[in-house]
Image: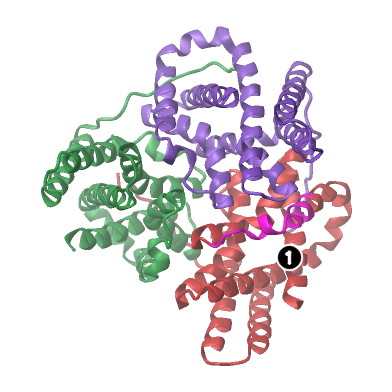
Chain colours: A purple, B green, C red
Amino acid sequence: MFLHSLYLIAIIVEAITAALAAGRRNMDWVGVCTLGCVTALGGGSVRDVLLGNHPLAWVEHPFYLLITGGTALLTIFISRFLHHLRKLFLFLDAVGLVVFTLIGCNVAITLTMPFIIIIASGMITGCVGGVLRDILCADIPLLFRQELYAVVSALTGLIYTVGLCAGLNNELMMTLAMSSGLALRLMALRFGWGMPKFIYTKNLH
Amino acid sequence: MFLHSLYLIAIIVEAITAALAAGRRNMDWVGVCTLGCVTALGGGSVRDVLLGNHPLAWVEHPFYLLITGGTALLTIFISRFLHHLRKLFLFLDAVGLVVFTLIGCNVAITLTMPFIIIIASGMITGCVGGVLRDILCADIPLLFRQELYAVVSALTGLIYTVGLCAGLNNELMMTLAMSSGLALRLMALRFGWGMPKFIYTKNLH
Amino acid sequence: MFLHSLYLIAIIVEAITAALAAGRRNMDWVGVCTLGCVTALGGGSVRDVLLGNHPLAWVEHPFYLLITGGTALLTIFISRFLHHLRKLFLFLDAVGLVVFTLIGCNVAITLTMPFIIIIASGMITGCVGGVLRDILCADIPLLFRQELYAVVSALTGLIYTVGLCAGLNNELMMTLAMSSGLALRLMALRFGWGMPKFIYTKNLH
């Protein structure tokens, strides 16, 4: 129940940040709306398509389409006030990342997937929405340059799944994984931590 | 039967316009052929993958692959004559949009999907092929800047589905939805109507 | 068994070349790892999603995720030595192309797909991994400009499938198709053979 409330907040936040990304590229309202839906619901959709887990969440609950598309459109009219809330947004985006990750892990656990696929399912759910957003913006995914984004998702999923495997309480592990992931992401944002870059200048051809 | 004939015309037209887009980027014959198939059949494929509706149309009827790939290749040799037919192509492209939309709605209706998913299914079928084409061309999708393209698809699906829900005749609603969608699209092209743009210049980070 | 060993070599080679592509765009370690997995396993995944063939290979054998992601990361540390092996890599990449193609054909044959879908399944398995890599790099796919890459895949699948349809021995046809495809690809690389380009400069709009 608590996770579900957080999920609704997470998809709303993702829709808003995607709408602002659309605005930065001067897209029209159709682009804003599409980018909002795809970013907020795309990670879970790719996960379910890859795992063969039908029906997809938004097909079963079309309400998710309305709320993300509607939020994205609403963002157009409130965008001037959002800049003052940017710290709140970065925080809520971090919450969304760990919530998406835990939901993705849970879906794979319900499907009795092996350990590595549970972690991968969490990471796909947490990270792929933003990758789809960047593909639709014709950019190299921010995920590949961003402050520990994927690492936070991997760590959150690892702590949660290892705890469950060790027979620990589900609520306890969820709280522990969320707070660890959230703490790491906020510290990464605060101190500008990132993964090392790989610079290669030669051509194989 | 009538819808099926229109479907064949629609995938041929989409393959031709995709082949010309490939030519504008100096792609080789492989690119022309691939872009033709993906643009013409991609919308329906994404819809079926998201709805879990197997087998996909072109897997069941591989003939569709041959006709779209073949048309795209043929376009290379007849491209010099096509410019004089550009008004015809814009008209046929609009026909394709509403035909794809109605087929997408019908697929979702057959799967007894909820109302919003029927509309979404029509829009995905009508619009996603062009989005895939633009992704493969490394461009921001034209859909996000184009004259009421997605809006026409949404309106066509809405009129059709609301009419069916109200118990009206299928053929009647199909004709009504097609002519309304077509009229709106042609007027949008004629008068340059588009959705308003969202311009946002700040960075959240 | 022999094909499976070649498959492992092929995904390792694809992961290495994808990691170098990531390095050429200054991606961080997350990007290197993701691009390695997606390029090596993406062709087979897209094929299985389109054919509705679950579970996907890497979902059933998560070991594939570890080996491709791990190889991509390892590439960062050995990249300075790889330039001297570039001829070996171009050879192994060609081996990978024909191996992926034959595996894709076999998957479609096992699913009793029609002839054209068998060829398409081989081409998707052989070529789509590189297309996904280029999409994630925000580039126009190299496939659409590359020396007979897709043509080699089509020819390999054709020889193999026609031979099987004619009742010839599986191992014989596999050897024949592999060596023909490999020979054509190596000659194309050696002599710079490519498909003709389609140059079109007008706009339909």
Residue B101, given in percent of the width and then of the height, sits at 28, 47
Left or right of residue B60, residue C47 in this image = right
Left or right of residue B19, residue A136 in this image = right
Compared with B132, C145 (above or below) is below
Compared with A193, C37 (above or below) is below
Compared with A173, B134 (above or below) is below
Q: Which residues are magenta?
A: C53-69
Report if residue C66 lies within the magenta region: yes
Q: On the image, numbered disc 1 is attached to which residue?
A: C10
Work out whether residue B200 or residue A106 is closer to the camera in this orientation and state it: A106
Q: Which residue appears at 60% of the width and 26% of the height?
A: A3
Quadrant of residue B119 within the rendered picture: top left
Residue C76, given in percent of the width and then of the height, sits at 83, 46
Left or right of residue A13, residue A99 in this image = right
Report if residue A164 lies within the magenta region: no
Residue A187, given in percent of the width and then of the height, sits at 77, 19
Question: Magenta region, mostly helix, strand or loop?
Answer: helix
Chain of the residue where label 1 is placed in the rendered structure: C
Q: Which residue appears at 75% of the width and 70% of the height?
A: C91
Q: Is residue A94 among what the camera can see?
A: yes
Q: Is residue B205 among what the camera can see?
A: no
Work out whether residue A172 or residue A134 is closer to the camera in this orientation and state it: A172
Q: Which residue appears at 50% of the width and 23% of the height?
A: A12
Q: Which residue appears at 40% of the width and 46% of the height?
A: B128
Quadrant of residue C58 within the rendered picture: bottom right
Quarter that holds the N terminus of chain B: bottom left
- The amino acid marked with disc number 1 is Ala
Label 1: few (<14), some or many (≥20) within 10 Å?
A: many
Quadrant of residue B71 within the rendered picture: bottom left
Quarter that holds the C terminus of chain B: top right
Instruction: Identify the secondary structure beneath mark 1.
Output: helix
Residue C46, given in percent of the width and then of the height, sits at 56, 57
